[in-house]
Image: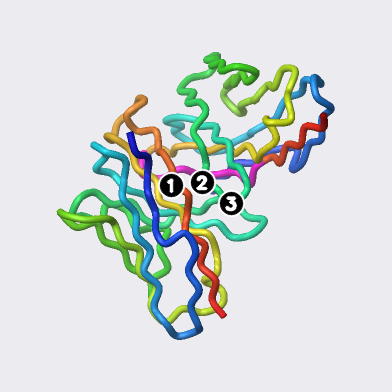
Amino acid sequence: NAGVMQNPRHLVRRRGQEARLRCSPMKGHSHVYWYRQLPEEGLKFMVYLQKENIIDESGMPKERFSAEFPKEGPSILRIQQVVRGDSAAYFCASSLLPGQGPQETQYFGPGTRLLVL
Amino acid sequence: EDQVTQSPEALRLQEGESSSLNCSYTVSGLRGLFWYRQDPGKGPEFLFTLYSAGEEKEKERLKATLTKKESFLHITAPKPEDSATYLCAVQGPTGNQFYFGTGTSLTVIP
């Protein structure tokens, strides 16, 4: 029973390049969340998606960042024209269903560590 | 503003020395409080969910409790393999996002 998968695990980009982070949710999960973790800081919510829909992007920076979760394939977090401040660990989580109860527990992937030179 | 505060930031225990970690929150309309364990270089690993004041959950040497303002993670007779950062997260009323504390870094010395 595979857990949440993320790739790549490590990504190095130069300033101005694009970064694409991928997330495959747990089998049967259709809800995906992206979080960012900066050194010495807690995980910060970025965006919540269901298949083909962005439900809540209140934590996403207005510029350069976008996310999608297509009908087929993994969820993608895309960062255009990266800057050094984008260096962080990006975690994806998935849940089975919304609503109170064990179904909405979020299970996390191993993360992608982005380093911008 | 919704906030989650964990204390202490770091805790060093001798093997077998029991202690408690604290998570206090100010999120209104709490839907759930979650505890995770995070090892260096890895993603958070789910431990417990608590939904209402007075609720308790146990797993091996860990026990989580919840009041209206805070949660405790009690560690009984810890072992070196319990060393990790323990994260508390609170689910707000919309249910869409978790608000995380900055964690307690636990080190258990043999």
Report how many numbered discs are placed on residues in the image: 3
Decide if residue B55 is on the left or right side of residue B71.
left
Q: Is residue B39 magenta?
A: no
- Expressed as whole percent of the image width and height from the top left, the position of residue A43 reads 53, 51
Per the model, the C-alpha gap separating discs 1 and 2 is 5 Å
B101 in magenta: yes
The residue under label 2 is B43
Please name the residue shown 35% across and 63% down the image.
A77
Q: Are both tags, 2 and 3, on one chain?
A: yes
Callout 2 amino acid = Gly
Mark 3 lies on a secondary structure that is loop
Say above or below: A86 vs B82. Answer: below
Q: Are marks 1 and 2 in contact (CB under 8 Å)?
A: yes
Kind of element beneath mark 2: loop
Q: Chain of mark 1?
A: A
Q: Which mark is residue A109?
A: 1
In the rendered image, residue B22, in percent from the top left (x then y), is placed at 68, 31
- The quarter of the image holding the C terminus of chain B is top right
Judging depth in this view, the residue of B33 and B63 nearest the camera is B63
Question: Principal SS element in the magenta part?
Answer: loop
